[in-house]
Amino acid sequence: MKITSDQLIADYPALQVRNFIRRYRFTYFQPSEAEEGLNLRSTEAERFIHNMIDIGYLSVANLHGAVDGPAYEVTRQGQKLASASAARPITRKTAERLLQEFMNRVWQANDKKMFAYKIESVVLFGSMLSDKERLGDIDIALELQPVTTNQEEFQKLYQARYRFSYGPRRKLSSDFEKAAWPMLEVHFFLKNYSRSFSLHALEDLGALEGVHYHILLGERSRLKKLIPFGIESNFRRMKLIEHEKPEFAQ
């Protein structure tokens, strides 16, 4: 999905809206976060949220009384907006280089157990599987899994990651974003500040009908079941990047 700097979404600048919902793509938020994050008065925040619900980017979060007052979460359509890029088109050669570097970081993160989450699956889709020479985004669906199923161990690892990677150097905007940090830091690391990547959750890809995809990492038979409406691509121009592990991953 592409957006432009002069585009409006729900009557607000598209980049500002994208950055806001990107912050809450793995969790939920309340109206006060919209007020603070978008610098809105309470009535403006309420109107913004309702508009975003009307166009399908947000929905009411059913938290069964876990928080006081209304809460909202990002929909599947909203996840696409959260991953939207405003970057200029790139050449296929540049895209192939960026994708190889991306996969190198995947191997590095997993082999060195750098984060609280491991990258279980990486699936490429979108324009890179077309015949186009100039591409917009490099669309990638990710599946992340905790590095341990032991909740106590995971919480200790999370606290360590927070102190080391974020803590004193960068302030999280809310408790909700803090809770999502173990996933967010994986995305930040893999993108490496590149605006050419558009990262998605694997379940979002699984809901698309007729989408062509190419598995870069993951168990093929299981992933095919998770993407039941997709078509596995045998696009000849696509390099087998998943076999090109860097030396430290051998």
Image (cartoon, grey):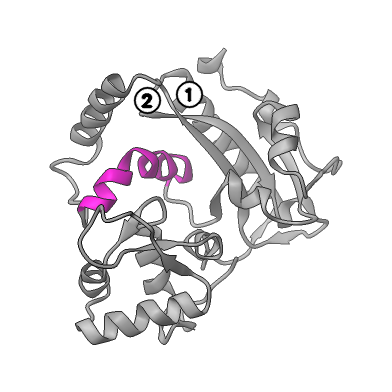
**To which residue does mark 1 refer?**
110
Q: Which mark is residue 18?
A: none
Q: Mark 1 is on which residue type? A: Asn
Could you say which quadrant of the image residue 126 lies in? bottom right
Question: Up-down: is 193 above or below 41?
Answer: above
Residue 65: % across, % down = 27, 56
Question: Up-down: is 28 above or below 238?
Answer: below
Q: Mark 2 is on which residue type? A: Met
Residue 203: % across, % down = 59, 47
Which residue is drawn at the image coordinates 66% and 40% (left, top)? 123
**To which residue does mark 2 refer?**
114
Which element type, helix, strand or loop, lies under badge 2?
loop
The range drawn in magenta is 175-192
Could you say which quadrant of the image residue 136 lies in? bottom right
Name the one closer to the observer, 10 or 217: 10
Which residue is drawn at the image coordinates 31% and 64% (left, top)? 71
Task: State whether the magenta stretch is mostly helix, strand or loop.
Answer: helix
Name the one closer to the observer, 157 or 62: 62
Are there few (<14), some (14-19), or many (20+) residues within 10 Å of tag 1?
some
Q: Is residue 189 magenta?
A: yes
Residue 112: % across, % down = 42, 19
Which element type, helix, strand or loop, lies under badge 1?
helix
Residue 86: % across, % down = 51, 68
**In the image as oriented, which residue stretches furthest toward the top?**
250
